Amino acid sequence: MAGAPPRSRPADPYPPMTAGEAAARGAAGLRGQPTPSEVIAGLRATSHGEDLVQLLSPEGTFTPHVDFPIELTGGLLRGLYRDMVLVRRFDREGNALQRQGQLSIWVPLLGQEAAQIGAGRAMRPRDMAFPSYREHGVAWCRGVDPTQLVGIFRGTDHCGWDPRATRFNSYTIVIGNQVLNATGYAMGQRFDGVIGSPPVTGDGDLGDGELREDTNEATIAFFGDGATSQGDVHEGMVFAAAFDAPVVFYCQNNQWAISEPVAKQSRVPLWERSTGYGFPGVRVDGNDVLACLAVTRWALEECRSGNGPVMIEAFTYRMDAHTTSDDPTRYRLAAEEEHWKLLDPIERVRAHLSRQGLADQDFFDAVGVEADELAARFRAHCIAMVKPPPERMFANVYTEPHHQLAAQQREYLAYLDSFADQAGA
Amino acid sequence: MSPITTTLAKALNTGLRAAMEDDPKVIVMGEDVGKLGGVFRVTDGLQKDFGDHRVLDTPLAESGIIGTAVGLAMRGYRPVTEIQFDGFVFPGFDQIISQVAKITYRTQGAWSMPMVIRIPFGGGIGAVEHHAEAPESFFCHVAGLRVVSCSTAQDAYDMLRAAVACDDPVVFFEPKRRYWEKGSLDTDLNAATLGAWPPPSFRTVVRRPGTDVTVASYGPSMPVLSAAADAAATEGRSLEIIDLRSLSPLDLDPVIASVRRTGRLVVVSEAPRESSVTADIAARVTEEAFYSLAAPVIRVAGFDTPYPPSRLEDEYLPDLDKVLDAVDRALAY
């Protein structure tokens, strides 16, 4: 599916500034604004290209795709709509909680709801996900309650859910690390022989009195456009290819790695990199939840049936800042965000539902009420989270006993107790 | 089985084989560990007998080896990874520090990381750059890792078995210049302690009792200490020789007990001297046995230079004369 990469790079009509130009800009007080070359890099990213898989247009028109069939039902569409609205709602609450001093930081997913819900809903219970740190929508699909995400950002834990039970690994903050971990997990799935069994169709009843369960599994690794520059992502793809690992490399290209545009990471579209590793790559409209769902379903099934790995580039946009500590006005123009607002992932589903008569105003109102209730529960839980006891600091550093650490813990708790004695005296 | 005489490398091979026979989840992975049997032949014959799904020749990428081993451990495997040479571990350092060491803590115990990272280390083989380093102090500084080093064939077997059985990640330093030195190995000797915690083979051991000066080290320097004790004995000086075996956590009680008797301690290591295992031992012995010390703790270690060209390594490495000189200085107080 990947095309031939261009032989040479076209000359950049907007080259970076010279030192003299930079000094002149600084003298003119323009230091904090994006340069022409930065603006152009951002605008380039709004060009989708002809290779984008799209099923639902921004206006809400559905067009089937021959390679990625999907059975459209009102229930499916309403469910995806609800997922995206609820996830966006608690994501906005996360931002608000940070601004009110309840969280030290929040990592917004605004704009990436379709990319995450589409991929998350394509997974089956047995599949394993390795997120980076923005995958609140995938977490939602894996049954991780939003309140379990918030401790990381309030500073009360590093992971508030059970990664084994949910098959949703802990958030991984070092860029790209999790891609190798995912590849290793998928290698284990291959060694365990849980791929390549004949698919079980229907309800698994083959008429011989025994119900069969589809035991095939796959792994999906989430990472961003910036991570594609990391050695670990490269090595993950090399290892996955070498061991035929059943892993989907799911790159959410949201166009910005904090302040650096995709052009800083790659000369070619990211999905084309898969060609170099010898496995297929697909670029999907990351703001189209149906396309993300259909393409990820296909990719996971390729892996489950023994044809992995597969790469997906979900072409989307980070509508908010990198984190609440970031200031995008320093490196990109508001016009770029305005362009992407027209491509909103939720509005197109709402338009389709309305136009096809698959949902009425009562449905949309009810989802809105449910979203507000979720946000209120999220907020109340967050505010009630207290500082963990000091013992927590020493817990689970090791699985087996460790006398040196145990001694440090004893000494520190005794030190704390000494203050209690003084207070009591 | 009665004791046999074998090399340290073969004892490691025997230990790996036994671990793989005992538990089908134990897998070996690294560069050239399959058909070649590893550049030091420690994994010799294992792929032939256990198959290439349990002895994995990996692409040449150390972060890839460690990072995929993390995922395999999550999947229920017990990976034994081989880093070909000490100086090649650093591409994998990020995964070791950021994931291997922290995942159990991050997930509040949901994942454990039963992984062994085998690293041939140390100098003395006339090698080119990056093939003779002693990087153990880096790993000792990291919470979540255990760090050990063997010095005899018996320990090579027992400690590797204990490391594979351990549910925590263990960085296992093998003294590469001692790979071909022979010793006694009885695979039954400590079989009953396999799975016990802490493993007896991870405890500090007094190799040779003495009364005048305590000399402690680990791994490749242990035969140097033995020779020093022999030489000192001819001058009427009695050295107590201690093998630390576990570098993180340190098992210092036997060292403290020894210092309480001798009053003098020399610590020996090939690693650069500052911010090192030897520095930590000096600090902690000073804290815990201050009134027993008749002399400062004296360190014999590598210089704080990069490892030199190999024609200079006899200047760099702790040797018999340097250890005896340190003993003289300790006794001069």
Image: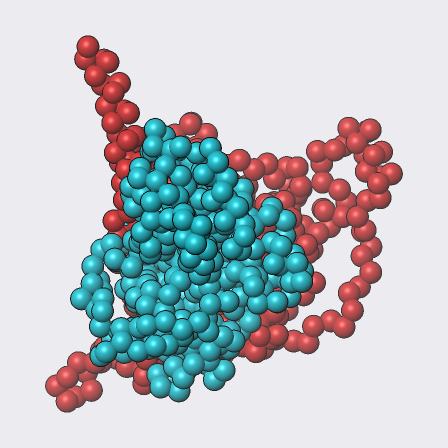
Chain colours: A red, B cyan
Which residue is drawn at the image coordinates 40% and 62% (left, top)? Answer: B151
Left or right of A331, for residue A250: left
> Hey, which quadrant is residue A420 in on the image?
top left
Q: Position of residue B85 (x, y in %)?
A: 53, 66
The single residue placed furthest to the top in the displayed view is: A425
Numbered disc total: 0
**Most foreground residue, B301 or A353:** B301
Compared to B125, does A334 lie above or below?
Answer: above
Q: Position of residue B97 (x, y in %)?
A: 46, 51
**Most foreground residue, A372 or B1:** B1
Which residue is drawn at the image coordinates 73% and 50% (left, top)? Answer: A40
**Most foreground residue, A129 or B10:** B10
The single residue placed furthest to the left in the displayed view is: A209
The single residue placed furthest to the right in the displayed view is: A20
The single residue placed furthest to the bottom in the displayed view is: A208
Which residue is drawn at the image coordinates 31% and 51% (left, top)? Answer: B209
Compared to A196, does A293 lie above or below?
Answer: above
Q: Is residue B205 visible?
A: yes
Q: Quadrant of the N terminus of chain B?
A: bottom left
Which residue is drawn at the image coordinates 66% and 37% (left, top)? Answer: A330
Q: Is residue A151 visible?
A: no
**Most foreground residue, A148 or B92:** B92
Q: Position of residue A23 (x, y in %)?
A: 83, 34
> Hey, which quadrant is residue A373 in on the image?
top left
Q: Position of residue A112 (x, y in %)?
A: 49, 52
